[in-house]
Image (tube, coloured by chain):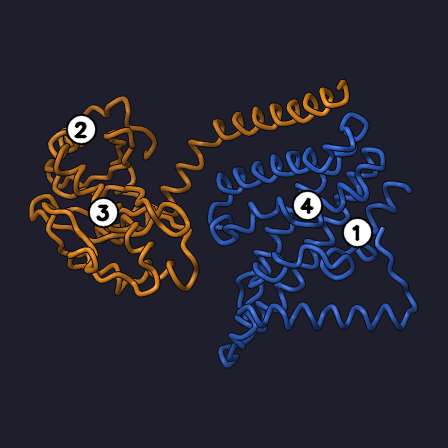
Amino acid sequence: MRDIGRLVLVLSLIGVISAGTLAYVRAALDARIEHQEDLHVRGPALSRLFARPAPDLLANKLAFRAGGREYPVFYLDDGGQVDRLAVEAAGRGGYGGDVVVMIGLDLARRTLIGVEIVSHHETPGVGARIERESFRAQWTGLALDEPVALRSAGGDLDAISGATFSSRAMVDGTNQVIELLRDHADEIVELAAGGERPARAKGGS
Amino acid sequence: MTAVRALTHGFWRNLPPFRLVLGLCPALAITTAAEYGLGMGLAVTFVLVFSNALVSLLRRVIPDEVRIASFIVVIATLVVLVELAMKAYFYPLSRTLGIYVPLIVVNCIILGRAEAFASRNPVLVSAADGLGVGLGYTISLIVVGSLREILGAGTWFGRPVFGDGFEPFGFMVKAPGAFLCLGLLLGVMNAWSRRRGEIFVQT
């Protein structure tokens, strides 16, 4: 009996120390990792969406909270008018977990500028084909006011054959953004336009 | 066994991918360029030195029945530390190595050294063994990576080594090239050892 107690105690202690160390290091490095992701992943995606150099775009960042999720939002405010947004969302239901997409939105024309993949864990050569330009081009020019769907679900988007899960996750991410805009467009624009950076916005500059 | 002997064993006698024939999965998968081999090798070395030291330090505290579970927790903690640090300071490298960084947890070299060496030897010697095996692994990965990069892409650590006329063997940076390269190296090393009459027994 005493032996079992010792086993439990030793293993628990090791586990607790390990968890504590990791939690501490994670908290210490979080801001830096976020910054690196901005620099190496979101920056290139943004500059492709808006066709201008990334450093100008990354500073215009805020984090919008809705429905228990946090959406990183980047905005373009030429001439004081917030007219274009890029919203990041984690599309659920991918074959290897969430497919994180960034959707470019043109608020004046009420259309999607395009979609970029921020991160995914889909199978190389199968699900990973969602990264292809030819597939993502379908998003360009879609209307901002109605949810999108794959052709198999009565929509207009062609899924990648053999990668329905991955395609569906992208649609899910897109629809999260479309719903977010439907419900909160004014709030987001107001936050972006307000000169004072709101308390919940973080990182970026 | 002294610390120096433990250290130098890693370079030849216990050279992981060729002598112990362990840690082959990353050795095949990420050696498309010398730089990735270096990054992966250093990550493994860090984990190996500290896991060996910690396991050796705790060898009298950890009961035999839960030793494997304890080793895995120690190793996994170190690997996550490496992963976080790599993301924070070497982001592009961490994107390239991808899943193979978290997979260091199940790299047989590390658990193998913990079980076969560190759990029976004092701290300093164990750390030296970790360093030796880790550096041996790093060198091996760089060699495989260099061969594949030079032949497959015509560059070494990203710098061109041939003139413009060189047509790279794209085959070498694909998966079959990895098997071919590792197999040939293994064959050459075995032939060399046989000629010298060395007999290898894993310790």
Residue B167 or residue A124, whichever sits in front? A124
Amino acid on which the number 1 mark rests in the picture: Gly
Residue count near mark 4 (Cα–Cα under 10 Å), binned few <14, some 14–19, many ≥20: many
Chain A appears in which tint?
Answer: orange
Q: CA distance from mark 1 to mark 3?
A: 52 Å
Which residue matches tag 2? A191
| B99 in relation to B69, above or below | below
Amino acid on which the number 4 mark rests in the picture: Thr
- Give a yes or no on whether discs 2 and 1 share a subunit: no
- Secondary structure of the residue carrying numbered label 4: helix
- Give a yes or no on whether discs 2 and 3 share a subunit: yes
Q: Which image quarter holds the N terminus of chain A?
A: top right
For residue B10, the mark is 1
Residue at horizontal 27 percent and vertical 48 percent from the top? A46
Mark 3, mark 4: which one is toward the viewer? 3
For residue B45, the mark is 4
For residue A174, the mark is 3
Residue at horizontal 27 percent and vertical 31 percent from the top? A63
Amino acid on which the number 2 mark rests in the picture: Leu
